[in-house]
Image (spheres, grey):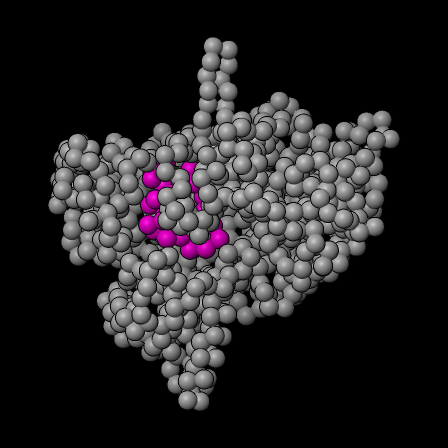
Amino acid sequence: MYIQRDMREREMEMEMGTGISEVGVEELVEAGLDVDEAKVMEKGLKEAIGRTGGGGDPRELWREITARRLLRPSHPHPVHQLIYYSVYADYDATAHGPPLYWFPSLYQAKCTNLGRLMETHGSKLLGALYKDPITSFSLFQSFSAEHPEVYWSLVLKELSIQFREAPKCILDTSDKSKHGGTWLPGSVLNIAECCLMSTNYPRKEDNSLAIVWRDENCDDSQVNQMTLKELREQVMLVADALDTIFSKGDAIAIDMPMTVNAVIIYLAIVLAGFVVVSIADSFVAKEIATRLRVSRAKAIFTQDFIVRGGRRFPLYSRVIDAEPPKAIVIPASGKDVGVQLRKQDLSWNDFVSCVNHLPRPNSYSPVYLPIDSTTNILFSSGTTGDPKAIPWTHLSPMRCAADSWAHCNVQAGDVFCWPTNLGWVMGPIVLYSCFLTGATLALYHGSPLGRSFGKFVQYQKLQNTVEVVVLDAGVTTLGTVPSLVKTWKNTLCMEGLDWSKIKSFASTGETSNVDDDLWLSSRAYYKPIVECCGGTELGSSYIIGSLEQPQAFGAFSSASMTTAFVILDENGVPYLNDQACIGEVGLFPRYMGATDRLLNADHEEVYFKGMPMYKGMKLRRHGDILKRTAGGYFIVQGRADDTMNLGGIKTSSVEIERVCDRADESILETAAVTAAPPIGGPEQLAIFVVLKKGYNSEPDRLKMLFSRAIQINLNPLFKVNFVKIVPEFPRTASNKLLRRVLRDQLKRDLHIHSKL
């Protein structure tokens, strides 16, 4: 049956000519529709083909199909696959760029945050060249990169930024030792206060919903809610308690799931003039100890346990093995801590009771600091040596909130959910993106892998004669990582849920899979997925999607606002801006929110040493290999250290993996690495493979399939030397694939092979 055959086989067949005109009732039934549904679908497809002039341009045909909502979230995924891949069966991506799946209407574009800004100021800034937010987006983005001080003077007014002392200017470039200049010099503020205070614009009132959340195993309960006023009072209570124990400027760590309490603690530390140390709750004691040592943290907030799927996993004991000076411990459930504490540690109840003697424990005067003061120490995800300690200032939150405002269209009244952790950069990003735009932060206290999380995301309400009771969160912007989407798709756990209130998705962390993105977008009638790629040291993304541009699965449509970069060839020479190419990224250094220092490494050496000059500026290293396609889209090809030389031709691991992932129905994912034999000679290509559950395959068979697929789709000279099947891939705690570990394993295998 068609529905039982793997997508990779169908996709390869469609690439060889199975077009949309050949899709009829029989194929639709094989894909999972009943006969009556298939007849309706066939009729709708024929009408869509007729309305687009016989389906000459597959992009227009797909646009018509999705606009008519012929494909619904309730349809089996093989139906979506059949139609999407059939529409684009004869499409020439080399000539036209990646296939497009989402197209903004002019009305939609004008209603976005950025579109409204462009409509208001575009004609003044661009003159007669300005037409509308879609036609003129690329021109406006380039203008923002060339004149960042103009863009930021407009956008900062769109966020709830309140300066205690206003900046002397937007950007000061007089100090030539600072590659990126000095942003908002002379300004003084507290960014946590900006998050907590009501404002007329963006509209944030005391009774506005600041946070909604639900605990695991409470699926049938109404979501919990906290207003802005309630959040502010809780943050001020914790800030008062912090003052009874710590000295201003102390670094205080947080190692716990991203719960309501974790968010309150984070904001309180910043409000009170201390520094947050971000530690992911997945780290082992050794990694926790390293981060405590590097940051010189005076204490750590943690939980007694982490509760997942009804089971309790120790967290406090793991933290204590890292020997923090002091721990403040929150119960994962109930009112009392479920572990025996060390004598220097405090339970949450004892900590907050420190302020019982105060006449107004819910009132607090924020600590105002210069804009370049550190608010948060985050860490790179590296696992060799000490991870880079990356300081965020009061400037960094402005950058991430502004990009969410401009590219994801996050605005007052939205509900923004992104399952993450304050130990990773996405935790602070989503926090600030909500509280500086007036959106509601949605938190699920549990695992995001299953249906319970999906039910929390959906919009469900009960209406009686008196009131409307909202049962679930009604998320409007949902952030993901690709591995999470893959799990949702493969387990079918989100079937039947109503995600139609979602206006857009966002994705980051690793390279997206086209078919997984197809599944995700289809859950909400093909809403756009804003792909984001950046880094902790940038505070946001340098390439991203835009709701003013058509979108392609797994691709980035633009540099982020005010960002400029070039793609360098292997000699460090930039390619032309409109040239399709592959090379290493070089960022223009005047990027608001990017670091200008590291706490435990030489910032100049890490980001600038060895980089070329361009247009009078030293380019900033980021380390990504980027492919610019026809049509101006971008696809990340992996890190610079993941490039490989096969027979004198440079290619990337990601490019090899994209082809191998599709080679056989048994494959869940692949990882491609190369290494030279110990005795010298050309690099040997190895493909590590994780099989789907319940499948078996032989390395020799896969080696033949991989070689054939690579030679057909990439280069006839490429050869697979080894295939190794493994149960899982080594990953960082943030789920990034550690090809370096696999490369070391290949080197060991080659060494043993040479001995034999």
Residue 648, image x and y in percent? 35, 78
Q: Residue at x 29, y 43 (%)?
A: 77
Q: Residue at x 42, y 67 (%)?
A: 726
Please tell me which residue is depicted at 53% across the width and 67% down the height of the picture.
Answer: 611
* Left-right relation of 413 to 688: right
The residue at the point 41 percent across, 58 percent down is 636
Judged from this view, the residue extending furthest toward the top is: 465
- The magenta segment is 504-524
- Name the image quarter holding the C terminus: bottom left
Q: Is residue 20 above or below residue 457?
A: below
- Front position in the image: 327 or 477: 327
Asked if residue 506 is among those painted magenta in the image, a careful observer would answer: yes
Q: Position of residue 751 (x, y in %)?
A: 46, 84
- Residue closest to the eye, 6 or 142: 6
Residue 403 visible in the displayed image = no
Left or right: residue 123 versus residue 698 is right
545 left or right of 296?
A: left
Residue 444 appears at what percent x and percent y? Answer: 55, 38
Query: Percent x, y for residue 571?
Result: 43, 72
Q: Can residue 294 be spotted in the picture?
A: yes
Please name whichever residue, 195 or 697, is drawn nearer the observer in this view of the structure.
697
Between 316 and 547, which is closer to the camera in this rendering? 316
Is residue 668 one of those drawn in magenta? no
- Reply above or below: 447 against 317: above
State the count of labels.
Answer: 0
